[in-house]
């Protein structure tokens, strides 16, 4: 492999690892609940196809959504993938609106063959994020109003190592060993200031103060994903792949610190309450997903996925969260390549992608489940690889337009546009060259 390509891979890897410590991948107020916004695990090729991935066996993609797919990598090649994600969001309720944006590095992953029947992969990706800041004024029978401010930050990341094996000619199984780690923190300020509701005075009410309540939880432990893919060969380079994924229930070690403080106008303070729990436990429910992908070799792909996870079974330090519920997601997408080997048109080499998804999220607010839906479209742009005319590195670009939540029931609606740019670097190895 060329030194220049090695340098690119090392640079993107180091940059990705460094960015995970300071990522704020969301500005959603719904990341206040549970473990925050949970990432759907679709990047690169699948991001333009509505996130469909469970039945995908593409040798130019690191598909860690289904670990059974790793055995699809060519026996003399490996793939490195890294991505950048940007999102512009308009949030509104029945009275006002505001705009937010963020750009972050996303996953990086390697996939490579061990033998012709054994593929492996490893990488790092965000698992969930908390990132919000909200303000409200509440009427008081003593003061004109009470000001409340809520802030949340933090990221849980997932480092994974996976293996995939052919156990029959067309049947592949795989597993990911994941290590989840990171911190999620929340802070609220309840400011008892304002004008007197009885006198109408404009000066601050004597004895006004602010109550600061903060908590931070550090999570860590191993989780396990299991995958299966069965490929049915049809006539004329056509195939149908059935995929399934099971994430087993997991228990995370959780170090929890909580503090409640009263802060006076003079900036003096009193600590009202402190809790410190080390080696607590947070239980994550298992999940199940199934998917189907229809392929015409080097020409067309179409797939659909369904996933579900019952977060009503989750326990946070031994307690259930009433704001969590059963989640269900459906993804669908297509990819079309006019002529991968055309000698006359570079546009014919491109992969054109379209898709959509609908998600009943695991969050429930004011007795209403938060739903999200979006439409995606994308391009796969091959990069000329002189060492292998049949396969090539790929630049993947996608755009997603979606909506989350509603302005009804005193809730917040998020309208967003998300951009994803990823690089899939494909390279031969263990290949002796007579000329360089």
Image (spheres, rainbow, N blue to C red):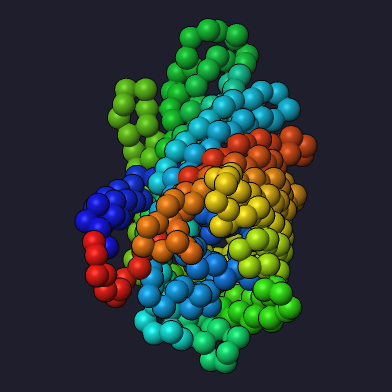
Residue 233: percent from the left, percent from the top?
A: 68, 81
- Please state which of residues 52 and 361 is positioned toward the viewer in this rendering: 52
Residue 157: percent from the left, percent from the top?
A: 41, 58
Residue 69: percent from the left, percent from the top?
A: 53, 74
Q: Residue at x 22, y 56 (%)?
A: 3
**Side (left or right) of 54 relative to 94:** left
Q: Residue at x 41, y 78 (%)?
A: 75
How many numbered marks have been drawn onto this rendered protein structure? 0
Quadrant location of the C terminus in the rendered image: bottom left
The image quarter in which residue 186 lies: top left
Residue 323: percent from the left, percent from the top?
A: 64, 55
- Please state which of residues 265 and 190 is positioned toward the viewer in this rendering: 190
Q: Is residue 397 above or below residue 246?
A: above
Observer able to see residue 298: yes
Q: Is residue 248 above or below residue 382?
A: below
**Side (left or right) of 259 relative to 300:** left
Q: Is residue 150 above or below residue 317?
A: above
Residue at the farthest bottom position: 168
Quadrant location of the N terminus in the rendered image: bottom left
**Side (left or right) of 36 relative to 364:** left
Q: Residue at x 37, y 81 (%)?
A: 114
Q: Residue at x 58, y 53 (%)?
A: 342
Q: Is residue 101 above or below residue 34?
A: above
**Side (left or right) of 41 relative to 118:** right
Observer able to see residue 32: no
- Please state which of residues 55 and 314 is positioned toward the viewer in this rendering: 55
């Amino acid at each position: 492999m060329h030194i220049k390509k090695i340098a690119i891979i090392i640079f993107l890897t180091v940059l990705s690892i460094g960015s995970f410590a300071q990522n704020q991948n969301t500005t959603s107020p719904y990341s206040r609940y549970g473990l925050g916004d949970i990432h759907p695990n679709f990047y690169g090729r699948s991001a333009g196809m509505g996130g469909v991935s469970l039945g995908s066996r593409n040798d130019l993609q690191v598909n860690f959504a289904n670990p059974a797919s790793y055995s699809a990598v060519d026996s003399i090649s490996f793939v490195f993938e890294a991505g950048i994600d940007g999102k512009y969001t308009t949030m509104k309720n029945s009275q006002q609106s505001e705009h937010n944006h963020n750009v972050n590095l996303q996953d990086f992953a390697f996939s490579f063959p061990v033998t012709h029947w054994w593929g492996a992969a490893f990488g790092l990706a965000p698992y969930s994020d908390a990132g919000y800041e909200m303000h409200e004024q509440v009427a008081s029978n003593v003061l004109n109003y009470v000001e409340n401010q809520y802030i949340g930050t933090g990221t849980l990341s997932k480092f994974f190592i996976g293996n995939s094996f052919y156990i029959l000619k067309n049947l592949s199984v795989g597993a990911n060993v994941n290590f989840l780690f990171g911190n999620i923190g929340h802070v609220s300020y309840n400011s008892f200031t304002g004008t007197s509701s009885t006198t109408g005075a404009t000066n601050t009410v004597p004895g006004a103060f602010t109550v600061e309540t903060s908590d931070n939880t550090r999570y860590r432990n191993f989780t396990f994903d299991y995958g299966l893919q069965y490929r049915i060969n049809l006539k004329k380079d056509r195939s149908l792949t059935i995929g399934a994924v099971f994430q087993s229930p997991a228990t995370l070690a959780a170090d929890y610190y909580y503090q409640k403080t009263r802060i006076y106008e003079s900036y003096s303070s009193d600590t009202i309450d402190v809790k410190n729990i080390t080696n607590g436990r947070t239980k994550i429910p298992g999940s199940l997903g199934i998917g189907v992908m229809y392929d015409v070799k080097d020409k067309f792909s179409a797939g659909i996925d369904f996933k579900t996870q019952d977060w009503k079974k989750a326990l946070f330090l031994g307690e259930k969260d009433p704001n969590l519920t059963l989640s269900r997601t459906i993804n669908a997408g297509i990819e079309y390549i006019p002529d991968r080997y055309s000698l006359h048109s570079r546009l014919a080499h491109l992969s054109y992608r379209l898709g959509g998804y609908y998600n009943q999220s695991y969050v429930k607010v004011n007795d209403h489940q938060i739903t999200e839906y979006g439409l995606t479209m994308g391009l796969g742009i091959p990069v000329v690889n002189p060492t292998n005319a049949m396969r090539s590195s790929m630049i993947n670009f996608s755009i997603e337009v979606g909506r989350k939540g509603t302005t009804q029931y005193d809730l917040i609606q998020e309208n967003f546009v998300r951009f994803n740019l990823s690089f899939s670097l494909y390279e031969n190895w263990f290949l002796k060259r007579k000329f360089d």
